[in-house]
Amino acid sequence: AQSVTQLGSHVSVSEGALVLLRCNYSSSVPPYLFWYVQYPNQGLQLLLKYTTGATLVKGINGFEAEFKKSETSFHLTKPSAHMSDAAEYFCAVTRGFQKLVFGTGTRLLVSP
Amino acid sequence: SQTIHQWPATLVQPVGSPLSLECTVEGTSNPNLYWYRQAAGRGLQLLFYSVGIGQISSEVPQNLSASRPQDRQFILSSKKLLLSDSGFYLCAQKTDTYGYTFGSGTRLTVV
């Protein structure tokens, strides 16, 4: 079975600071990994995904994530936080036709 | 393009009342469809998924049921709502081998 663990239910940063949201996965086969963002009372929007190939994946809004097989991690980063980045972020894992399994989410708070 | 429509956006229902949430998709045929629930302070939990008309798989035992009467329609139902059914319900569609698209969600409050 596949699963993801997101460390920290809340992360607080100042505007302009580095954003780091952690995600570790468990999978018996090479995983497909995703980061989604959710703004209040809205659906999920895909930020980026890793399937195969380059392990550093760039997404929308300046976010990127690196797939590290040796660490079973897929942490999300952004060099400089913006107030509009405040939202909830979900890491997810799947493989091919299997179901998409989400982590419990991390709420990002950005202060001026 | 592939679009998911969910309604209503918000719903307040008394305990013991029935529930019907509808999800319809556009732009593809025979999609894999999913219902997720997000409870307050918790992550996204997969409730049901469907790979075709009349084919429903349940992930967790609960007070809810799902049906797929048409290729592009996925319905979440309950005969009698519980307080614990409150949450944010999201419909999702698998768009290709790697991609999923989500609807805008329904905020259900059971009072």
Image (cartoon, grey):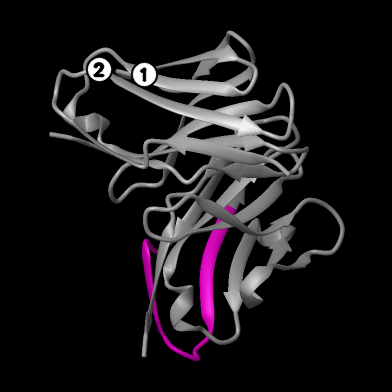
Q: In the image, is residue A84 above or below residue B76?
A: below
Kindly identify the residue that appears in the image at 60 percent across and 85 percent down: A79
The location of residue A70, given as percent across then percent down, is 72, 59
Q: In the image, is residue B104 above or below residue A85?
A: above
Near mark 2 (Cα within 10 A), the count class, few <14, some 14-19 or many ≥20, is few
What residue is shown with label 1?
Answer: B77
> Disc 1 marks which amino acid?
Ser
Relative to B29, A7 lies left or right: left
Q: Please state the extent of the stretch shown in magenta in the rendering.
A: A8-24
Relative to B69, A109 lies left or right: left
The location of residue B71, given as percent across then percent down, is 65, 17
Near mark 1 (Cα within 10 A), the count class, few <14, some 14-19 or many ≥20, is some
Label 2 element class: loop
Residue pushed farthest right? A53
Kindly identify the residue that appears in the image at 46 percent across and 21 percent down: B75
Label 1 element class: strand
Q: Are marks 1 and 2 in contact (CB under 8 Å)?
A: yes
Foreground pick, B2 / A2: B2
Which quadrant is home to the N terminus of chain B? Answer: top right
What residue is shown with label 2?
Answer: B18
